[in-house]
Image: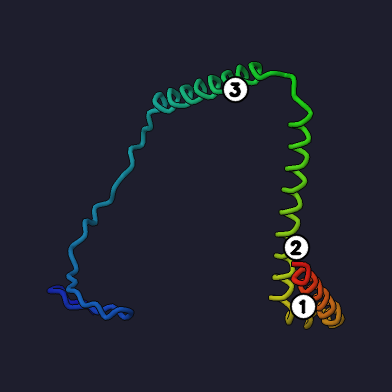
């Protein structure tokens, strides 16, 4: 549809107009070099392995330098932070499950007809909990 001398084109979304001309492309087939220098690859792999071993050695040294006496306060902080982390993940997962159930309510009810009453009760209970928390605040 575009002649060799070119023509104006217009964007269907923004109505921008520009001139386009087909240019001859280089149709020469590019060939890959059949021989790959395995020496270069071997050297690079060897240097990567050397770097990995150096990093491992440094990590071992740092671990051995750390004091081995840990206080109980750090342990309790870790336990408390893990508990709250798990609590947050549980809450986010629960909310995501509720949103997913609400989104897919119609297809689920079509497949499992008895699920409609259960979902209705679940959403009513969640609404009651929400109102209770708002009253506490």
Vertical position of residue 28 compared to residue 2: above or below: above
Residue 63 image position (x, y, % from top left): 65, 21
Of tags 2 and 3, the one toward the viewer is 2
What whole-number distance in Å separates the C-alpha atoms at marks 2 and 3? 39 Å
Residue 5 image position (x, y, % from top left): 12, 74
Residue beneath the point at 15% across and 74% down: 6
Residue beneath the point at 17% across and 77% down: 7
Of tags 2 and 1, the one toward the viewer is 2
**Judging from the image, what secondary structure is the residue with disc 1 in?**
helix
Q: Which residue is mark 3?
A: 59
Residue sitting nearer the eye, 32 or 93 = 93
Q: Which mark is residue 18?
A: none
**Judging from the image, what secondary structure is the residue with disc 2 in?**
helix
Q: Are there few (<14), some (14-19), or many (20+) residues within 10 Å of tag 3? A: few
Q: Which residue is mark 2?
A: 94
Is tag 2's residue or tag 3's residue first in the polypeptide sequence? 3
Q: Are there few (<14), some (14-19), or many (20+) residues within 10 Å of tag 1? A: some
Of tags 3 and 1, the one toward the viewer is 3
Q: Quadrant of residue 135?
A: bottom right
Please say if the residues under marks 3 and 1 sit with CB atoms less than 8 Å apart: no
What whole-number distance in Å separates the C-alpha atoms at marks 2 and 1? 18 Å
Q: Which color scheme does this rendered protein use? A: rainbow
Q: Which residue is mark 1?
A: 108
> Where the C terminus falls, by quadrant?
bottom right
> Where the N terminus falls, by quadrant?
bottom left
Vertical position of residue 37 compared to residue 81: above or below: above
Residue 30 image position (x, y, % from top left): 29, 48
Residue 44 image position (x, y, % from top left): 43, 26
Q: Is residue 15 left or right of residue 60?
A: left
């Amino acid at each position: 549809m575009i002649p060799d001398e070119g023509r104006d084109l217009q964007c269907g979304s923004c109505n921008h107009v520009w001139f386009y001309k087909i240019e001859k492309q280089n149709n020469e087939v590019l060939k890959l070099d059949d021989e790959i220098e395995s020496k270069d690859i071997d050297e690079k792999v060897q240097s990567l392995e050397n770097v990995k071993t150096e990093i491992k050695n440094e990590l071992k040294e740092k671990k051995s330098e750390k004091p081995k006496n840990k206080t109980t306060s750090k342990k309790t902080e870790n336990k408390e932070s893990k508990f709250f982390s798990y609590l947050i993940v549980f809450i986010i997962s629960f909310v995501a499950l509720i949103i997913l159930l609400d989104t897919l309510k119609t297809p689920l009810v079509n497949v499992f007809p008895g699920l409609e009453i259960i979902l209705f009760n679940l959403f009513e209970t969640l609404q009651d909990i929400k109102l209770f928390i708002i009253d506490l605040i």
